[in-house]
Amino acid sequence: SFQIKKLVYVYLMRYAEEQQDLALLSISTFQRALKDPNQLIRASALRVLSSIRVPIIVPIMMLAIKEASSDLSPYVRKNAAHAIQKLYSLDPEQKEMLIEVIEKLLKDRSTLVAGSVVMAFEEVCPDRIDLIHKNYRKLCNLLVDVEEWGQVVIIHMLTRYARTQFLSPWKVDEVVDEYSENNFYESDEEQKEKDQKLKTVYTMDPDHRLLLRNTKPLLQSRNAAVVMAVAQLYWHLAPKSEAGIVSKSLVRLLRSNREVQYIVLQNIATMSIQRKGMFEPYLKSFYVRSTDPTMIKTLKLEIMTNLANEANISTLLREFQTYVKSQDKQFAAATIQAIGRCATNITEVTDTCLNGLVCLLSNRDEIVVAESVVVIKKLLQTQPAHHGEIIKHMAKLLDNIMVPVARASILWLIGEYCERVPKIAPDVLRKTAKSFTNEDDLVKLQILNLGAKLYLTNSKQTKLLTQYVLNLSKYDQSYDIRDRTRFIRQLIVPNEKSGALSKYAKKIFLAQKPAPLLESPFKDRDHFQLGTLSHTLNSRATGYLELSDWPEVAPDPSVRNVDVAESAKEWTGILGKPKNEKPTEKFYSESEEEEDESASTSSSGKCLESNLYFHYLENWSGSDSESEKEDKEEGSTDESSGSSSPSEESSDSESDSKETAAKKTCRAVNE
């Protein structure tokens, strides 16, 4: 039975590589099964034969794939496309022969085959764009009816194809922005000239529009991978004014399981950096729920920060105040970083955010306090002249804060702006010198930096303290600290061995540092294609295919034209010829154009002819029945004798003549 065969096939696929000699004994059975009338048996035999990873049967596999690619069953042809990938991984030297089979299967019009053969194309020869030219429009039109996972593969392939064959639709937006400036006082004639230039700058290729139009309905797909594939296609190919239609579909996917949410939110985070307007109407959809895992919370927080502007910042800050109180400390720390980014990007709320972060310094949680200190340090670097009081307040908290990163940040701030707090800085150095041996390595390095800066600016008061700290660090266990100590001593403590570099010690240590940039961690991911593994990992994965830049000059669009005669020949080769083949005749006569023009009249004439014909037959059948009755009444004696009456023969001849006359009448009416 077929069920037992399937179990045997599974067993062979599992153990064929371990016991190759025994697996070879079953090859002849598979070859016979490839000729079986049942398409399921043929497909299963091909599937198992291609799964036996024994190099010696590669020629047999190649022959089986070629025969299956011409099979009448689309299910068998689909399995042939799957077998191509297996054979290529087993023996890459068969690439040229496999490309021929791929080229043949790409011309297949079955939706069952399309996704599988495109997957084989992506695996074997993704750079052979010339194989797609003639099949581009067919794939676009079949896309809606292809299986879901086939749709994903085809969409990604067509995205790469479109980036090599069409002009960039984004140039229109650039030109519009250029012309939209300083045009308030321009005359109508100048405006008309610019409008004409805009029209001539870019015209979307019909094939480009075909791809966008046929993929748009797939945004309603139940499969999240299909929706994500269409979203990345619109992001990379559509004009910026049309890319916004994917926003609603992506937000809908946030109701899925957490794994799908994670991938979708990562892609939305990248999109929201460059085009905030796409997701601003759906800001509330990114509010954090208490049931969300930490990774989802962090991504939603990232998106809200990207969407922050003057209009919604007050709402977002109130939301962030709630998040800071979360029991999830990692999420609370990420919220504090988000507040710092909002303060940097929107200058109107910088002071508000800074005051809120200062209030968090009195929080009981050390992690919240430490993160607040780090963010405040970065904000103070942007405008330190106006926040001397905040630096003093942070110096007072140094005794209570034990997190190494926070302590190091406070010491760095005091050392960097020691001239603004001349009374507090020496006392901070005195306290930290006492606990130097018990501090973390990160804090020790900042104590050394603080001592060096105070030695250069206030040597009378801090000279001995600095030398004491340098002597302690000279024998520290960490070689980084010992190395830093030797470097600082040679620069700030002059002696006979000191070089010319010691003259510039003050410029080296007290040089003005640039303010740090608080940027999104997703900013650098935009050079990867959305929806790919490389984008998720933020690292180039094996097998990743980069999107090419838009061409400066549009390639010839005629390469995608397909002749009707060629397609008919291709399908004759795939489906075969009829058994009783007759001499081919022309389907259309030479006067094809004239017949097309009179198609409507001829069709109506034919309908009239058929109606008249049946009408006359009904009348004649009625008249014949009446004549037959009269003949029966008059010639009943003749019928009893068994001889045929001449009246019947005459009636038959009359009916034939009437029928021919009716046909002639119908033809005359038709003419």
Image: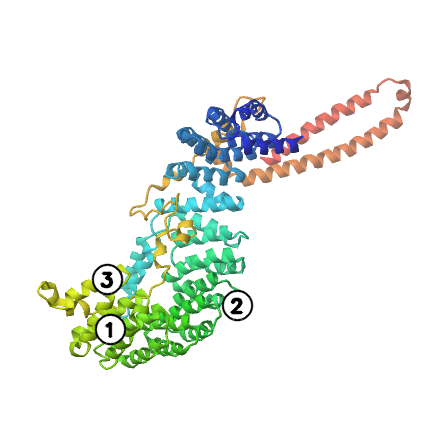
Residue at image position (45%, 37%) is 120
Q: Give the answer, above or below, for where 467 lies relative to 551.
A: below
Q: Position of residue 147 (x, y in %)?
A: 54, 44
- Disc 1 element: helix
Q: How many marks?
A: 3
Looking at the rendered image, the disc whose residue lies closer to the viewer, 2 or 3, is: 3
Residue 529, percent from left and from top: 39, 51
Q: Amino acid at mark 1?
A: Gly
- Nearer to us of marks 1 and 3 is 3
Type of the residue with mark 2:
Ser
**Mark number, residue 237:** none
Quarter of the image with the C terminus is top right
Q: Nearer the viewer, mark 2 or mark 1?
A: 1
Instruction: Name the N-terminal-most of marks 2 and 1.
Output: 2
Say which of 617 and 60 sits in front.
Answer: 60
Answer with left or right where residue 33 lies relative to residue 640: left
In the depicted structure, whether residue 418 falls above or below residue 116: below
Q: Which residue is mark 3?
A: 482
Image quadrant where one finds the N terminus = top right
Q: Secondary structure at mark 2?
A: loop
Reading the image, the residue beneath label 2 is 290
Q: Residues within 10 Å of mark 3 (few under 14, many from 20)?
A: some
Amino acid type indicated by mark 3: Arg
Mark found first going from the N terminus, 1 or 3:
1
Front-lying residue, 423 or 325: 423
Circles 2 and 1, Cβ within 8 Å, touching? The answer is no
Position in image of residue 204 (x %, y %)? 37, 50
Task: In the rendered structure, find residue 415 and report the number of the disc placed on it.
Answer: 1
